[in-house]
Image (cartoon, coloured by chain):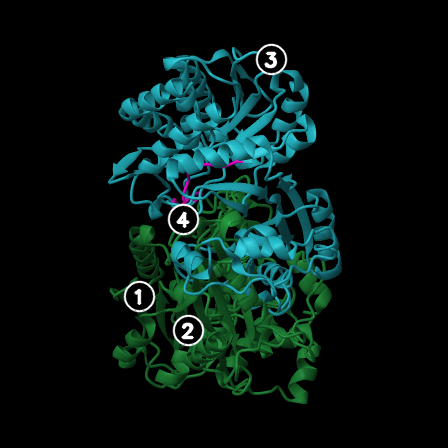
Chain colours: A cyan, B green
Amino acid sequence: MNDSRNQALRYANQHQARFLQELQEFCAIPSISTDPAHKADMQKAAEWVAEKLRRAGVNNVQIFPTPGHPVVYGDVLNAGSQAPTVLVYGHYDVQPAEPLDKWSTDPFRPEIKGDQLFARGATDMKAQDLAAINAVEAILSTGNLPVNVKFLIEGEEEIGSPHLDPFIRQHKDLLACDIFLNPDTGMLAQDVPTITYALRGLAYFELHIQGPKSDLHSGVFGGVVHNPAQVLCELIAGMHDRDGRVTLPGFYDSVIEMDEAERQELARLPLNEAEFQRLSGAPQIWSGEKGYTAIERYGGRPTLEINGIYSGFTGEGAKTVLPAHAMAKISMRLVPDQDPDEVHRQLLAYLEQNAPPTVRWEVNVLTGGKASLSDRFSPGVQAMSKALETVWEKRTMFKREGGSVPVVTQMQQILGVDAVNTGFSLPGDNMHGPDEKTHLPTWYKGTQALIHFFFNLS
Amino acid sequence: MNDSRNQALRYANQHQARFLQELQEFCAIPSISTDPAHKADMQKAAEWVAEKLRRAGVNNVQIFPTPGHPVVYGDVLNAGSQAPTVLVYGHYDVQPAEPLDKWSTDPFRPEIKGDQLFARGATDMKAQDLAAINAVEAILSTGNLPVNVKFLIEGEEEIGSPHLDPFIRQHKDLLACDIFLNPDTGMLAQDVPTITYALRGLAYFELHIQGPKSDLHSGVFGGVVHNPAQVLCELIAGMHDRDGRVTLPGFYDSVIEMDEAERQELARLPLNEAEFQRLSGAPQIWSGEKGYTAIERYGGRPTLEINGIYSGFTGEGAKTVLPAHAMAKISMRLVPDQDPDEVHRQLLAYLEQNAPPTVRWEVNVLTGGKASLSDRFSPGVQAMSKALETVWEKRTMFKREGGSVPVVTQMQQILGVDAVNTGFSLPGDNMHGPDEKTHLPTWYKGTQALIHFFFNLS
């Protein structure tokens, strides 16, 4: 058995150059799920993944169409019914690359600089997808998989996985598993192997404020017609109080407080204010919600963010216009037991209480998903913890994560299975921003760790 | 003399069709002064005006280059040194046409619908330029001008006339005059001939807020890094207090209060809240600065407007980004004796007091000009009042204007001459907005009134 493990580890090492070339190929496909102009690229990316799975030795590879972007499935079920079944999750879609002028490379022409590969989607999460597929390829090419493995690689994670929930419900038997592996969470630092036991949920809205019927001359109507951009700013400003708390009525009612033991454990993580400041380049870290440290606010507390805002004239020069309309994209990161629908109602209640009668307003729901918590002592989490410690020769850190992976909640709710959340992206990888990159030595280590994980489970 | 007047009035009536054709020709030139891409169109518009002046019989027509867009000059000085000299002001530049999708016509393909001509610049102020030139053409084609007339038609009004002040200073003798006619202010309503005796000044800024070094993942950094869009909204929200007053320190210190007599006269104007609401299409009129009626706030009080705002992701869909940067275009309408430089210092002081240390900020000055007040009992204003009453057969209304015409202040300061502010644009003409239009019967009447004005002065 140890021999099989070692052969697989050697195979992965010997094929690094080809794995890297394939990663570049995969990242060159601009699979931007939110942009209808890239529909063909989404199909192309799905087919690329399916072909990669087949070449890796995975059976039963299928591309399932959905009302949105397709889901790619494949499995290797030769380990027998006594062996555990691992469902490996991934997504082949990526965030938009805008603002393009802030990139030092072309986001869809992957470029290697030193130990880094620069490309949109490099770290989130095409490298993670391939780490898992490559680990399975290495084992299958040198022997047999000690566990049953299924792959579920979707194309709508970056838009909130709107069609994944019905897909999972419709394919409960196909997806049945004992362990759900989600390599989309990442590491705290290059030398800190990390497992995430809590993920935040998300509720994402678009708020529109409509004032006059069309843009007006600000000299004629200023001071008489309420400026929708001003109204929007006032409404947004009111969404936090002086203590950095979100003011939507009832926002904290369902929040489960962290206990003292957990807060002490989180305090041991290397993600302190100085580290957040270094990673973000912000002049100073925000105090945020009063009474909580940065690392607690990051994963353990809900937040409200303005993701975008737009009104009036934003071109070059001075246009003296009073805008007719103003828009903001507003999203909340949720913790257990907050519910996105409840947060929607809270936002509406806030606007009903605070929006002035001088404007009309409208809220569109863009996406939403609940938060999740995993048992840190399950066999899957323990197998992964050991695998990471073998490769990194460091103690695995357990953390909460600020981001959202709706599929983790869905798997808990529909298949009744807890997630093993890990991954090999680093905090400085510029996920979702310009110059996204992945650290290649970490990626190679990740593939090794996943090989160990599969063997540890047997 | 009455015979000459009547011949000129008849000439203007007989040539209406050609005048309209010329107005369409003029409006078809996209002379957008703020947009460097339209530099050639600016030159073309200046040449078009020069040619029109020559054809009207105006002498000494010259196009003066400036570091920005050229100034067109011409004069007819045959009335003798005893006769008064009128300097007629105009501008051939227009506002940008964006948002283009809100127009029902192509903004630079003038289209007649019923009594209206639709085009960017139709009412602001190409129709006004031509009303004055056509009046002079009518008089010169049928006899002699009873006064000396000079034309000064600039190309930078919509960007705050940055090169007009030095131009006037350099050409003080050429521009010397007794009366300054500015037909850029307009009417209160179709049947209300109007003279404006006060214009507001303008101070226009761009405020930039810079947070982290690049766009971040809102799940990872939300609640820890201060969101620049949120900071911008909070700063803007704080610029008005609960009584609708602007909170910049010292903002009202130099404001000259209206006296009771003036407030009573303003109360007689037909521009009440219901009218503002009808014109704007806003759901309800804003109460604005407490203690002042809509018509008082409109021209007699300073205001602060958000002309544009931008941050983060504003495309289709849900991008969970924490933006690195946020920007707002903010302008203030000023009344005597506020000073744009002073307001700039007040804005900086406000930001120094209120901007948090979690972001960097920067203010760019885009344009500025002081407010102005004219003597309502000067010969020029009286001649215009009588001319309007002759054509409209209604009492002329005297009003303050919310907009800004920096040249009026400059003429007062440099040439020591008061302005006669009038014009034939209507409040519903969508000046600066989509579907700008001019009401043709009012425009024809305007030409007639200007003919009377020149004869009334002799």
Label 3: chain?
Answer: A
Q: Chain of mark 4?
A: B
- Graded by Cα atoms within 10 Å as few (under 14), some (14 to 19) or many (20 or more), the crowding at tag 2 reads many
Viewer-side label of 4, 2: 2
Distance between mark 1 and mark 3 Cα atoms: 88 Å
- Element at label 3: loop
Label 2 chain ID = B
Mark-to-mark CA distance, 4 and 2: 32 Å
Residue, disc 1: B71
Distance between the alpha carbons at the discs numbered 3 and 2: 79 Å
Magenta includes B455?
Answer: no
Mark 4 or 1 closer to N-term?
Answer: 4
- Highlighted magenta segment, given as a residue range: A421-432
Report the residue marked by disc 4: B25
Q: Is residue A214 visible?
A: no
Residue at 38%, 40% (x, y): give it: A393
What type is the residue that disc 2 sits on?
Gly
Q: Picture quarter containing residue A349?
A: bottom right
Residue B35 numbered mark, or none: none
| Numbered disc in front, either 1 or 2 | 2
A80 relative position to A432: left or right: right
Tags 4 and 2 in contact by the CB under 8 Å rule? no
| Contact? badges 4 and 1 (CB < 8 Å) | no
Of all residues, the one furthest to the front in this rendering is: A2
Q: Which mark is residue A81?
A: 3
Q: Amino acid at mark 1?
A: Val
Image spot of residue A411 (x, y percent): 63, 30
**Residue A129, horizontal then vertical, whole percent:** 44, 28
Residue A429 falls within the magenta-colored stretch: yes
Q: Look at label 3 and name its amino acid.
A: Ser
Q: Residue B56: x percent and y percent?
A: 36, 61
- Res B268 visible: yes
